[in-house]
């Protein structure tokens, strides 16, 4: 029986669970399964990891206080229109699938907002269970852009049962049930080149799997606490490449790279300029309706993922970052 759930700080403000200032309100409500203990997995960048000493109230740079489930459900019932999506993130522990299915079913009973579940690789019967209780989308985070980085940072190298192939297989398996409503996340700044990242984005696009980009965020108490955030110009190039690939405007084979850095996006100049000028490639990516405000960055900047339509000043700054 689920009694508690963690609620992302900004989500809790919108739900009226506590007070606080919001620079940009979240369009997706974010919940995290509550578990007394740490995740069974050991991803080196994650505060929830088995080997981390970080506060378990943290995920990325966001605080997720524990809340009584009934209070959260009542708040969803009342504030049904405040969000276009609800995202339930899970920690890997025994029994998590039953808990997350229970959570999805309880929320569906109280409001009809579409629900995404972001979880560990699951067996087909568990994926079907999730669909059966009403999840609209499912996400399984690859996080690392290459098999080597995956192994070193979250796989067998870290004493975890996760493998690159296993994650890809689970994503493909999820497609059989959820069709094109399957997502993954990739973290930029774990040691990959732009070429590695863009090749993997293409590989996922070709499998019809949505890609949400994150910028690596160092958190005290994790193994990667001292690693810097990615270079902003490099992040912009990857965002731009992701957007072109997902909108069928280019492919990785058409792009050109020097020392792993992209210098030709494989599209005519006018298309490239128009795409950059729209500002769209630089907004938060992932499931539709998800803006995850300031999940990777302080509102003071530098902003990696823009949570709302870009102002002209921000577009001009991005053009400078891209060397336009
Ligand atoms: S893109 Fe947003 S809603 Fe979708 S799984 Fe990621 S965090 Fe959740």
Image: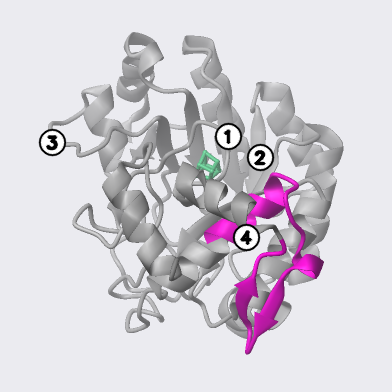
Query: Which of disc 2 and disc 3 is earlier in sequence?
Result: 3
Callout 4: 10 Å neighbours few (<14), some, many (20+)?
many
Residue labelled with disc 1: 116
Q: In the rendered view, how is the structure colored? A: one colour
The residue tagged 3 is 20
- Dot 1 beta carbon under 8 Å from ligand 1: yes
Q: In the image, residue 250 lies at what x, y percent?
A: 74, 56
Picture residue at 58% right of the left edge, 64% below the top: 143
Do the CB atoms of the residues marked 3 and 4 lie less than 8 Å apart?
A: no
Residue 241 is labelled as: 4
**Badges 1 and 2: C-beta atoms under 8 Å apart?**
yes
Give the residue drawn at x 41%, y 59%. 37
Residue 276 image offset from top left, x and y in percent: 50, 51
Where in the figure is residue 164, as x and y percent of width and height?
A: 74, 70
Q: Is residue 114 left or right of residue 51?
A: right
Q: Which residue is mark 2?
A: 138
Give the mark nearest the N terminus, 2 or 4: 2
- List x then y, in percent, for residue 103: 52, 29
Mark 2 surroundings: few (<14), some (14-19) or many (≥20) residues within 10 A: many
Q: CA distance from mark 3 to mark 4?
A: 36 Å
Q: Is residue 270 left or right of residue 82?
A: right
Q: Which residues are magenta?
A: 239-266
Q: In this rendering, is residue 238 above or below 110? A: below
Camera-near label (1 vs 4) is 4
Which of the 4 image quadrants contains residue 185? bottom right
- Look at 79% across and 61% down and name the residue there: 203
Foreground: 147 or 118?
147
Question: CA separation, marks 1 and 3?
Answer: 25 Å
Mark in front: 2 vs 4? 4
Is 129 within the magenta? Answer: no
Query: Any atom of ligand 1 within 8 Å of the CB at mark 2?
Result: no
């Amino acid at each position: 029986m689920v009694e508690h759930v963690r609620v992302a700080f900004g989500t809790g403000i919108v739900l009226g669970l506590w007070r606080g200032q919001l620079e940009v309100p979240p369009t997706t409500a974010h919940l995290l399964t509550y578990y007394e203990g740490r995740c069974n997995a050991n991803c080196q960048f994650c505060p929830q990891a088995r080997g981390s000493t970080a506060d378990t109230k943290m995920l990325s740079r966001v605080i997720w206080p524990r809340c009584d489930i009934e209070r959260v459900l009542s708040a969803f019932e009342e504030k049904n229109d405040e969000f276009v999506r609800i995202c339930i993130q899970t920690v890997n522990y025994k029994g998590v699938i039953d808990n997350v299915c229970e959570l999805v079913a309880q929320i569906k009973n109280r409001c009809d907002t579409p629900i995404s579940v972001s979880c560990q690789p699951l067996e087909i019967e568990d994926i079907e269970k999730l669909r059966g209780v009403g999840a609209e989308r499912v996400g399984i985070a690859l996080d690392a852009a290459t098999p080597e980085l995956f192994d070193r940072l979250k796989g067998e190298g870290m004493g975890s049962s996760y493998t690159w192939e296993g994650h890809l297989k689970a994503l493909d398996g999820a497609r059989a049930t959820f069709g094109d409503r399957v997502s993954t996340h990739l973290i930029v700044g774990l040691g990959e080149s732009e070429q590695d990242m863009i090749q993997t984005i293409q590989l996922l696009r070709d499998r019809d799997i949505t890609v949400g980009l994150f910028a690596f965020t160092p958190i005290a108490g994790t193994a990667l606490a001292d690693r810097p955030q990615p270079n902003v110009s490099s992040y912009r190039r990857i965002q731009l490449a992701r957007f072109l690939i997902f909108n069928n405007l280019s492919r990785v084979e058409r792009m050109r790279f020097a020392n792993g850095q992209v210098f030709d996006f494989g599209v005519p100049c006018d298309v490239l300029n128009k795409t950059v000028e729209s500002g769209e490639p630089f907004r938060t990516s992932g499931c539709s309706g998800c803006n995850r405000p300031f999940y990777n960055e302080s509102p003071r900047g530098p902003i990696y993922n823009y949570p709302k339509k870009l102002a002209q000043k921000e577009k001009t700054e991005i053009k400078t970052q891209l060397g336009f």
